[in-house]
Image (cartoon, grey):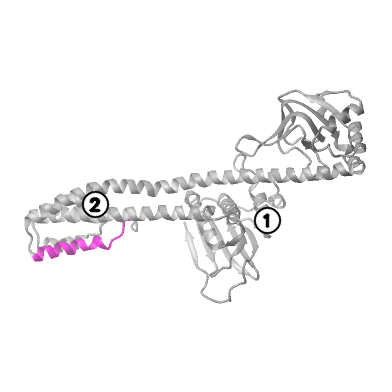
Amino acid sequence: MSWPDVGTTLELETEEKVLRLREHRILAEVPSAELAWIAAHGVLTRFAANVRLLQHGEPVEGLVFILSGRMAIYVDRGEGRHKVFEWRAGDVSGLLPYSRMKSSPGDTFLAEPTEALIVSAELLPELIRQCPQLTAALVHVMLDRARAFTSSDLHDEKMKSLGKLAAGLAHELNNPASAVVRSAKLLVEGIASAEAASRALGAVQLTPPQREAVDTARAGCLTTTAPGGRSALEASDQVDAVSAWLEAHGADVSTAGPLADAAVTPPALDRLAAVLHGRALDLALRWIADDCAIRMLAKEIETSASRIYELVAAIKGFTYLDRETVLQPVDVSQDLVNTITVLRAKVKAKSAKVEVTIQPALPPVLAYGGELNQVWVNLIDNALDAIAPGGSVEVSARADGGKVVVRVVDDGPGIPDDALPRIFDPFFTTKPIGQGTGLGLDIVRRLLNRHNGVIEVDSHPGKTAFEVMLPVAAPEPEPGGSPPPRVTLS
C-alpha cells in the first residue's frame, strides 16, 4: 500500500503548490526553479488523524515535506512501544537523499490531521541532480536526524542498563541494611541481658583465680570474627557439642548458641568448670554468652555498614557523579572493579566465577568516564548472560604499546557464525524477545569510536572474547614490577 492510498490527494496547480511550499521552513530559501521541480513531481496529500502511515519494517517510499499537522514514530525495543521522534509543520521526514535507510525502524502515526507533499523514492536521484541547494539542506537534516536517533538509542540503552543495575543494587544494599537493622535491635536486647548477668555475677563475689578463669574463657570471643567461615554442618556440630557439655554439667543449655558462635569449646569450658561450680558456673556462662553475643553483633554491624559503604563508593565511581562531564584521564582498572561490584547481584544469581586480572600501574586513558563505564557494563553483562549457571567470566586489562587493552572472555556457547558479522548492527540481538534491545553492542561501538577506540571479537563454542583497545592518556610506565594481581569473585 502506497502512502497516498491512506490519504486524499489534493489536486492543485504547480503554482499553488509552490506558494504552499514557500511557507515550509526548509524550502524557504530554495531557488524558485528547484521549488517548481518539487511542486511538479510531488504529490500533495491530506491525511486524517490517528492513521498509521508506516509499520515497522515496511519500505520507506519517499521524501515527505510536512506542511501542516504532526506525525511521530514509535519504536518497541523490548520494553513496550514508545515515541522516539516527532515531526511538525516545516519538518522533513521519510527517505532523504543519500540516506542508507531501507525500511522504517518503527511505526509512524499521524497524531492529527496532516498535509504533506510526498516525492517518490524513485525520483530522488533526479532530485539530487535537479535541486542541488535543496539536496544540501536535506543532507543537514539527515545528519541532525541521525544524531537525534543516536541520542535516543543511547538514552534508551542507558535507562535499560540503569534499571537492571538498580534492581541488582537494591538487592545488594538490602541484605547488609537489613543485617544492620536486625543486629542493632538484638544489640539493645543483648546489652540489657549482659548488664543483668554482670550484676548477678558480681554478687557471687568470685575469687581472683575464678575471675581469671572467666576472663580466659571469654578471651576467645574477643578475637573471633562473626560466624561464617564454618559450614552449616560444622556450626551445628559445635552447638551440639557445647549443648551436651552444658547439659552434663547442669548448666543452662540456652547459652549453647552464643558460646559456640564465640568459639568457646568444651575443653575451654572444662578449664572453667575446674574452678567454678553450681550457680557461680551458670552465671559465669550466662555473662560470657551475653558479652560475646554483644561483640558478635557489633562486628556484624561493622561488616554490614562497611559493605554498604563499599557499594555506595562503587556506584559513585561508576557513575562519575562527582566529576564534570569532560574528557579526563580515567583509571580503567578502578572502573572495571566498580563495574563488577555493581553487577555482583547478577554474578551471584548465575553462581558465576568472575576473575579479574589487571596489570599494575596501568596507564590512564583520556575519556568520558561515565560513557566508558557503559562499555564495560554492556560487555560484562552480556558475558554473564551468555554463560550457563556456574560458568566463568575473565576480565583483564593491560598496556600494549600506546594502548590499554581490555578483554572480556566468557565460556558460553559462543556466537553463531551467521550472527557474528551482525552483532554490532543496531536492533540485532541473539537474545530472546524482550531480553535484548539489540542496541548494546551498537552503542559500545559508537562510544568507542567517540574515544578513538577499537573493539574486536573472536568466538567459538566454549569461548567468546571481546577485546577493546583505547589510546593511553600518558606515556607507558617503565616495564617490570610485580606480576598482575588476580581477583576472583564467585
Residue 209 located within the stretch drawn in magenta: yes
Between 231 and 289, the one lying in front of the other is: 289
Q: Point out residue 215 in the picture as x, y percentages from the top left corner.
A: 17, 63
Q: Is residue 239 left or right of residue 181?
A: left
The magenta-colored residue range is 208-227
- Report helix, strand or loop for mark 2: helix
Residue 403 located within the stretch drawn in magenta: no
Q: Which residue is mark 2?
A: 257
Residue count near mark 1 (Cα–Cα under 10 Å), binned few <14, some 14–19, many ≥20: few
- Report helix, strand or loop for mark 1: helix
- Residue type indicated by callout 1: Arg
Q: Is residue 272 left or right of residue 258?
A: left
Quote the CA–CA distance across marks 2 and 1.
59 Å
Residue displayed at 82% across by 32% down: 23
Mark seen at residue 450: 1
Q: Nearer the viewer, mark 2 or mark 1?
A: 1
Q: Point out residue 118 in the picture as x, y percentages from the top left corner.
A: 83, 32
Between 482 and 142, the one lying in front of the other is: 142
Q: Point out residue 166 in the picture as x, y percentages from the top left corner.
A: 50, 45
Dividing the picture into quadrants, the one containing residue 3 is: top right
